[in-house]
Image: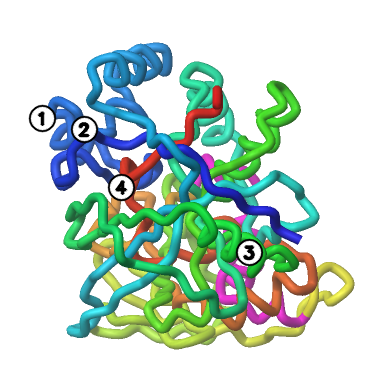
Amino acid sequence: MVEINGFRGLRYSFSNLSDVITQPYDKITDEMQEEYYKKQYNYARLILNRESHASAAKTLREWIDKGILKKDEVDSIYPLEQEFRYKGKTFVRRGFFAIFKLDENDVVKHEKTLSKPKEDRLKLLRETECDLEPIFLLYDKDVKVSYEEKIAEGTEAGVKNSLYRISGEEVERIRNALLHEKVLIADGHHRYEVALEYLKEKGAEYKMAVFVSMRDPALIILPTHRLLYDVTLGEEEKSRMRKLFDVEEIKTMREPEKHEFIMYDGSRIFSLRPKTYNFDEREHTKDYWMLDTAIFQRLVIEEAFGIQDIEAHVKYVREANEAMIGKNDLLFLLHPTGIEEVNKVSAHGEVMPQKSTDFYPKLPSGMVAYDLRD
């Protein structure tokens, strides 16, 4: 069961947050950081400080001393509405900030993690002693949540984020409604594992999260594309590709279909369709092997190119035009993973390859924080 509670949110003392909220730390580029830093109290100074994690901690305490950040007086849950447009339509995704007691048996993971981001976030947590960014958790039921007391709002990356507050008996009602639920991590696997490590070090039992129902019609997953850099596409690699895929050159870049990859080498574009899905089910379940990210991992990364150190040769991009294609680089477009696939694979207790899901929009950082010294 998942045990959630309200908490005394640490929040900006003003209600218009458009100048201070940011994307999650791992989505902030150098250019974005530069823009964020133009605002005196922007949250990037805490989650991605230019100088050091110690400087971030110092800035945090200064902002608290100045009253820029204030802590609510009573334990609360903080409902969140995110209004955004996608493919010409307007959506509103609803969830709520709460803290939950750390127990690996109650939280289902679905993606592998990388070591460097975890080391970095753990160092920041040690310095600040503050849970600055939530993880994104999914639960499989309908829970009525009140959106009446709006306390702040802010627009970031074209998404309007509205924060509300509920306390007292309503917190207990929501807590009881989810008490016997297992939850699935949609986003924030690295932060979750860092919280578990910090629990061992400091005994901090709770982690802040935003809880969203899997039944929310505004729950959208985007594809995460792969940029293979510093690789060789020689005759040997091309021969392997032809054995593994039906390869067809196409004239224009387009979204791939399910079980298709679009490859761009900087001048030519190819459609790749696997010739087989007959993988070893002693290694993973059939549901796992039906994931495009798993097929890509096995056939492209491992068999075609023989890549063993993923962090040294693979970058992840949301938009094709984000990728800078160098001489020895290849861009691969993937089809998005569906929520049904996530459920099936996680039900087997399996974890997907890195960056198998990209839930859109991202949760904003800076709406509320959880002081672990409480």
Tag 1's secondary structure?
loop
Mark 3 Cα-neighbour bin, 10 Å: few <14, some 14–19, many ≥20: many
Q: Are marks 1 and 2 in contact (CB under 8 Å)?
A: yes
Q: Earlier in the sequence, mark 2 or mark 4?
A: 4
Q: Quadrant of residue 336?
A: bottom left
Instruction: Find the distance from the CA under tag 3 to the CA under tag 4.
Output: 21 Å
Instruction: Find the distance from the CA under tag 2 to the CA under tag 4.
Output: 11 Å
Can you identify the residue that label 2 sits on? 42
Can you identify the residue that label 1 sits on? 38
Q: Is residue 355 visible?
A: no
Foreground residue among 274 and 38: 38
Can you identify the residue that label 4 sits on? 23
Q: Position of residue 174 (x, y in %)?
A: 57, 64
**Residue drawn at x 25%, y 58% as measured from the top left:** 161
**Residue drawn at x 61%, y 44% as measured from the top left:** 192
Q: Position of residue 216 (x, y in %)?
A: 45, 79
Where are the magenta residues, as a range? 286-313
Name the amino acid type tagged 3. Leu
Is 292 a magenta residue? yes
Q: Is residue 118 above or below residue 75?
A: above
Is 290 a magenta residue? yes
Q: Is residue 273 above or below residue 111?
A: below
Q: Position of residue 342 (x, y in %)?
A: 61, 74
Q: Are marks 4 and 1 in contact (CB under 8 Å)?
A: no
